[in-house]
Amino acid sequence: ETSDYDLAAKVILHGRENQWGQFLTLGTTMYRLGIIQPLLTAIEGIIDKVEYPRYRSELNNILGDLYWTTGKVYRAISCQQKAIAISQNCLQSISATPDSEHELYYWRMLEVDSLLSWGLYNIDLWELAAAADLFKQVIDLASHTKHHSWSEKASLGLALVRSHLIGFDSSNAIVEHLYHQIIELENEAYNTGRFAYFMQILGQILFNYQRIASAKAVWQKTILFSQEGNFTQIKAKSLTGLGNVERHRNNLEEAEYYHHQAIESLEKIDAKCDLAEAYFQLGITLKQKKQANKSIYFLRRAVKLFRQIEAPKQVERVETVLNEMIASS
């Protein structure tokens, strides 16, 4: 209101340490808690007027995730592209001196984080080849550097893409390593809310590998940490996963229960990409229950949302199942 837009940005980007030792901004914390619309409105109102490059790049990084959650995936990609461009420009202008070490660390971190997010957005569009290319970029930039944790996350993203495309990949060391650390060793570095989003990705990979019990164990642990941190979206995605596990085991009543729990949470925060997937998985479960009309209803809701998101490959994926249902009903 006082037209001090950089100071307004500073408020949104004010950081504090959470219970897992992460130093997170107010904006990131609000996003994780599912407080989407107020934050979206606040950032949209100032971002084009912010002058300080660091603030502008961080706001674009957060705004990208907000747009992604609400189904505006191409706007989300545009935000991350802006953040990457600012980061790369700043990296080129900084001389490698001891005094610049922190600046170099910061801008590289923002670059790899934005590339990682862009890759995740492409998975939701079912643009799997594009997602794989972005994850490989993160791995090339971050592997065995101070940003190695981003490389691990990108390696999981890449493993998820490959599990969708080719199924089981026995050579994927990162999947085995992280499962061992999380479930068997209960390694504190991974068994925290800070890794929760990528824990649920690990669950998806294990499920695609047909390691159903392992996937269930990972998703159950993810839900526990999501509850501790009030991460609604991550918990809901994991509930969808548990629904898939129970469907695979032919426990269809339990499967339907988990799907509805996930949908209820995702509808509250208007998480369109995840909601479309939740509708799709419920439709498949209802198909297995031989409830054709209900199955068709939720598959059509999934198609409608994926069309809103402008994800034609996702529409095609759902319509394949939908057309089979209509033909057999």
Image (cartoon, helix red, strand yellow):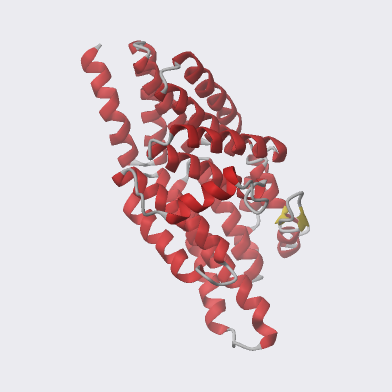
**Quadrant in which the C terminus appears:** top left
**Quadrant in which the N terminus appears:** bottom right
Residue placed most toward the observer, 211 or 263? 211
Please provide percent x and percent y for residue 191: 64, 46
| Residue 270 visible somewhere in the drawing | no
What is the number of callouts on the image? 0
Residue ranking furthest to the left: 327
Q: Which residue occupies 56% across, 28% down? A: 267
Q: Which residue occupies 34% across, 44% down? A: 168
Left or right: residue 290 compared with residue 233: left
Q: Which residue occupies 51% across, 74% down? A: 88
Left or right: residue 128 compared with residue 191: left
Please provide percent x and percent y for residue 128: 34, 50
Residue placed most toward the observer, 42 or 197? 197
Please provide percent x and percent y for residue 98: 67, 87
Left or right: residue 197 compared with residue 211: right
Residue placed most toward the observer, 41 or 59? 59
Residue 156's place in the image compared with 301, above or below, is below
Residue 110's place in the image compared with 232, above or below, is below
Which corner quadrant of the image does residue 48 belong to? bottom right
Please provide percent x and percent y for residue 7: 76, 62
Residue 116's place in the image compared with 287, above or below, is below
| Residue 315 visible somewhere in the drawing | yes
